[in-house]
Image (cartoon, helix red, strand yellow):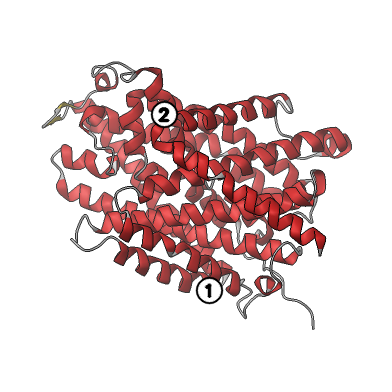
Amino acid sequence: MKQKELKRELKNRHVQLIAIGGTIGTGLFLGSGAAISKAGPSILLVYLIVGTALFFVMRSLGEMLLSNAGYQSFTDFATDYIGSWAGYVTGWTYWFCWIMTAMADVIAVGVYVRYWFDIPQWIPTLIAIILLLLLNLLTVKLFGELEFWFAIIKVITIIALIVIGIFLIMIGFETDTGHVSVSNIWSHGGIFPNGMIGFLFAFQMVVFSFVGVELVGVAAAETSNPEKNIPSAINKIPIRILLFYVGAIFVILCINPWTELSATNSPFVQVFTLAGIPLASGIINFVVLTSAASAGNSGLFSTSRMMYNLSKNHLGPKFLSTLNKNFVPGNALFISSIVVSIGALLSYVIPDTAFSIVTTISAICFIWVWSIILITHIIYLRKRPDLHKTSIFKAPLAPFVNYIVLIFFVAVLVVMLISEETRIAVLLTPIWFIILFITYALRKKK
């Protein structure tokens, strides 16, 4: 009997919106509040720096994926160019990355629901996990449609926020905290109100804001025309960064001084509450709730596909490589959902710090994955100059820029180690890699 394969049912519009959905999530809508409290207006520069670095990572990823029609994710080319250990460790680390990210997203669902209902945070968190599991068990085309419409909601909301913000700036709208003005950017302690320390400590949450930018690479196996769709999605990343991150945060900081925004709540919701428009803040809260659900949906999609791919390549338990009647890796989805439900437990045990802990661990693990993509691309350039020469999607400034971005990632990890808020997560995360290297060594002995 012929083995079932993943279906290529994701169209160009799905891939484009998955790419957008991957770059607009809980890190931006909720985590940006904490980042703004640390960096003040210099947060705009932080978003630009991290976004630029990740654009070069994505260009490396795109060239590698298109260099071999058999590549279904970055674990495949990491195995080819670095070794089987790299595919194993990176694949399972990516699974762990998205498990942590999905936890953060479902925890955020609980936070947003409490805006309307005074109920324990873990209840809506658990409900969200069950609903997302049921939706993901259906066809990949349905996943694409869900992400398409979730992302449309995000895009319309952010564009509306920017348009309304520009209008309020033009008329000099007066709020309880003063006039809406571009001068709010520098009138409350300057661009770097907390100095370089505050600026540097904001990088952790901003890095987390961008997790999922590489999701288009995971979706490659289910893309109907990867040669067209992948380059198109990747090349639009700079525009999305300028619009959705820098543009939205710039408008928020013009409407209200950064000093008025809370570190623990979404600035997208707060901005309208502070401006005296509570109805709009309620609508925005609904939007960021759907955004968290969307990001959690992407988390279950990517973790299940990574499990499936690892198992198919004999790097995981065989039962995870089976597909259900809808050509979806059902067993992998169930396992991922069970592990993500730990997020509901964390919401119950440590509701105030759960989000911060899981976002830090997620950011560290994603830095590993992005670094492996860059390192693999460097080796590919050295070993296969023929493929690079004929590539239809060459990564610019390679390999020079690869080394620059790798140095930048190391600097971010050093900053996380220095920061008291993120130090414990940095010290604990290596345990995961130790476990992976041990399990890999044990598998090799069999």
Residue extending furthest toward the bottom: 1
**Residue 201 tag number:** 2
Dot 2: what SS?
A: helix
- Can I make out residue 25 in this image? no
Q: CA distance from mark 1 to mark 2?
A: 39 Å
- Residue in view at x 68 percent, y 41 percent: 372
Tell whether 29 sits left or right of 74: left
Helix, strand or loop status at disc 1 = loop
Q: Measured along the vertical axis of the image, is residue 82 above or below residue 332?
A: above
Q: Is residue 170 left or right of residue 305?
A: left
Quadrant containing the C terminus in the rendered view: bottom right
Give the foreground label among 1 and 2.
2
Looking at the picture, does residue 4 appear above or below residue 1? above
Q: Position of residue 301 (x, y in %)?
A: 55, 62
Q: Where the N terminus falls, by quadrant?
A: bottom right
Pinpoint residue 11: horizontal percent, then vertical percent: 60, 59
Q: Horizontally, is 336 left or right of 290 in the view?
A: right
Q: Amino acid at mark 2?
A: Phe
Q: Position of residue 95 (x, y in %)?
A: 59, 56
Dot 1 corresponds to which residue? Answer: 137
Earlier sequence position, callout 1 versus callout 2:
1
Q: In the image, residue 6 lies at what x, y percent?
A: 68, 68
Q: Residue furthest left?
A: 176
Amino acid type, mark 1: Leu
- Comparing 217 with 314, the one in front is 314
**Residue 347 figure quarter:** bottom left
